[in-house]
Every structure is written in C-alpha cells, then in structure tokens.
Amino acid sequence: METPFPGDPDLAAHITILLKRGITLSGQKAADVFPEVPLEDYLDAIMDDFESAREQIVDTPIYSILNLCRVYSFVKSGSILSKKEGGKWGAGMLPEPFNRTAEKAYLIYSGKVYEDCFSDDLLLAFSDYVFQKVNELLSERGIRSDNRAKSIGLYYQENRRED
C-alpha cells in the first residue's frame, strides 16, 4: 500500500489541524485546497509525535508538553486541537502540579510569559503521567498497540462527535 504522505509523516497531522482548527486569512478555504486526511493517518502522525515528545521533553519542553496534552485530549475525547489549545486543555483538565506545567507551556507559547524554566524531574513526571493516562485509555477501549491507528480510528468512527 502506498504511503499517502511519503515525504513527511507529520503532514497528515499538519493538514488535519489546518482543516479542523485553521483560520483562513485570505484566499480559498483550506477545505477547498486540501483533502480530508484519513483518521488512521492522522493518528499515526500524532502518536509518533507523542512518543518523540515523551523522549525529548527535557530538551524541548514547550513543544513536548503541548503535544503530549493535545494527544491526551484526542485519545480522551476525540478533540483535534492545536498545540496552543492542547496546552489550554491541559491547564484545565490535568491534576496538580501538571495543570500548572501545561498552563506555563501554554502561556510561553502564547507569548504571555517569557521564562521557560522547568525542572527535569517535573518534566519527566509530567511525561510519565500523560503517557500512563493515554495508555490506560487505549487499553480500556481495547485498542491494541500493534494496530493502534486502525483500532483508534474504528473507535472514533463509531463514537464520532463534531468539534
């Protein structure tokens, strides 16, 4: 089977975010220019990002925190969020102290705060917490790790809600 986006595995996620969360400033609407991305391709892309974010959280804390939050939100509710929206979601949904970690990343990303000091211990604990919660949700839904994208895709097609 041919890879739909062979040059850039993240392209599926970028186009999905553009179609679901993007704002047209001028020209044609994104939906008139870009095709819908199959849910399985979007999931493969964000789950790859999820695993990378977990591994790189100490080196790239803002990017990693926001990506971990938006993947957690998607797996929990099916919501497709931007990085910024993911941070805001995490600030409102995660328990202490992780909600403050998500809020700080959101504020830094939004340009409202400029200090980006996070302790390595807190970052690793945040990553472990979100990773555990995502895996618990996947397990509860009977989603197998060897066929993750297909399983999640079927779950959300059956339980679809519009954002």
Image (cartoon, grey):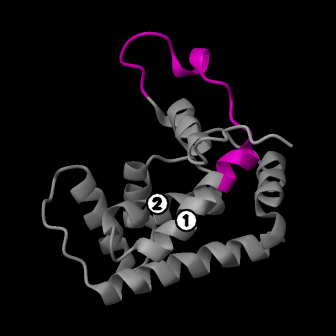
Q: Position of residue 26 (x, y in %)?
A: 37, 12
Q: Residue at point 75% right, 49% down? A: 40
Q: In this view, does 19 lie above or below 70?
A: above
**Classed neighbour count for the residue bearing mark 2: other residues with Cα under 10 Å, few (<14), some (14–19), many (≥20):** many
Q: Is residue 63 above or below residue 20?
A: below
Nearer to me, 5 or 35? 5
| Dot 2 and dot 1 residues touching (CB under 8 Å) | yes
Q: Which quadrant would residue 148 be assigned to in this image?
A: bottom right
What quarter of the picture does the C terminus occupy? Answer: top right
Q: Which quadrant would residue 155 be assigned to in this image?
A: bottom right
> Going by the picture, which residue comes out furthest to the left?
114
Nearer to me, 120 or 70? 120
Q: What stretch is highlighted in magenta?
A: 23-44
Q: Which of marks 2 and 1 is nearer the N terminus?
A: 1
Nearer to me, 116 or 77? 116
Q: Where is residue 132 in the image (x, y as percent from the top left)?
A: 59, 81
Amino acid marked by disc 1: Phe
- In the drawing, what numbered circle is on residue 50? 1
Q: Residue at point 31% right, 85% down? A: 120
Q: Is residue 25 above or below residue 14?
A: above
Q: Name the residue under label 2.
A: 67
Please state if 5 lies on the left or on the right of 63 as rendered: right
- Residue 42 painted magenta: yes
